[in-house]
Image (spheres, rainbow, N blue to C red):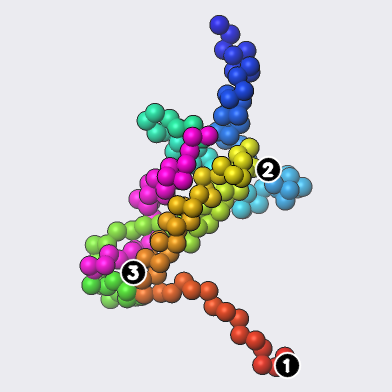
């Protein structure tokens, strides 16, 4: 049995290998000058990290079977590497922006970091051959989770994330 011919004749293998390959997502901005910018480099690193996470699952998870639930598991996994103190509701400093003393509350990923990460992964998924309709990073449960994290972290820190509306300039009448 020739492994090379089996791989090339199997259409699902081609799709899977294209989606799982650790390649730089193509972009018109990066392709025009052949030097990826900071965003493209970060997007490539994030994509490679997510693909490595899928491969490390027992058993390894093919990308075409990945769902919003798997993306949420990935985000929970990333929390262990977070640097933002998020107070629990039972903590004395819950809702206080600048606590006067340390507390045992855990460090987690900041909402803004998770939001930006999901945006980059959404783009990388489609640039690596995934279809917009099946993009697990655009799943409704991922959006709900990000909203929940934003609201909880704003309450825990005593900081509002509400968008500020522009006030009309009084000089322009």
Disc sitting over residue 15 in the figure: none
Give the Cα distance between marks 2 and 3: 39 Å
Secondary structure type for disc 3: helix
Near mark 3 (Cα within 10 A), the count class, few <14, some 14-19 or many ≥20, is many
The N terminus lies in quadrant: top right
Q: Is residue 83 above or below residue 166?
A: above
Of callouts 2 and 3, the N-terminal one: 2
- Residue at 44% x, 38% y is 53
Q: Was residue 113 drawn as part of the magenta stretch in this picture?
A: no
Q: Residue at x 57, y 12 (%)?
A: 3
Q: Which comes sooner in the sequence, label 2 or label 1?
A: 2
What residue sits right under mark 2 in the picture?
26
Extent of the magenta region: 64-91
Q: Residue furthest right?
A: 32
Which label is found at residue 156?
3
Is residue 166 in view?
yes
The residue indicated by pointer 1 is 173
**Mark 3 or 1, closer to the camera:** 1
Q: Is residue 143 left or right of residue 57?
A: right
- Where does the image place residue 9, in percent across and percent down from the top left? 63, 16
């Amino acid at each position: 049995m020739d492994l090379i011919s089996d791989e090339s004749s199997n259409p699902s293998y081609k799709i899977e290998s294209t989606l799982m390959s650790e390649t730089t997502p193509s972009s018109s901005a990066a392709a025009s000058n052949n030097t990826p910018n900071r965003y493209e480099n970060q997007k490539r690193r994030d994509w490679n990290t997510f693909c490595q996470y899928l491969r490390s699952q027992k058993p390894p998870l093919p990308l075409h079977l990945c769902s919003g639930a798997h993306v949420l598991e990935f985000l929970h996994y990333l929390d262990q590497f977070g640097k933002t103190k998020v107070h629990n509701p039972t903590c004395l400093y819950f809702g206080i922006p600048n606590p006067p003393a340390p507390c045992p509350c855990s460090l987690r990923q900041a909402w803004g970091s998770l939001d930006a990460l999901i945006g980059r992964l959404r783009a990388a998924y489609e640039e690596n051959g995934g279809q917009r309709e099946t993009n697990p990073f655009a799943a409704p449960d991922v959006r709900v989770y990000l909203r929940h994290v934003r609201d909880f972290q704003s309450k825990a820190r005593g900081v509002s994330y509400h968008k500020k509306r522009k006030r009309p300039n009084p000089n322009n009448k």
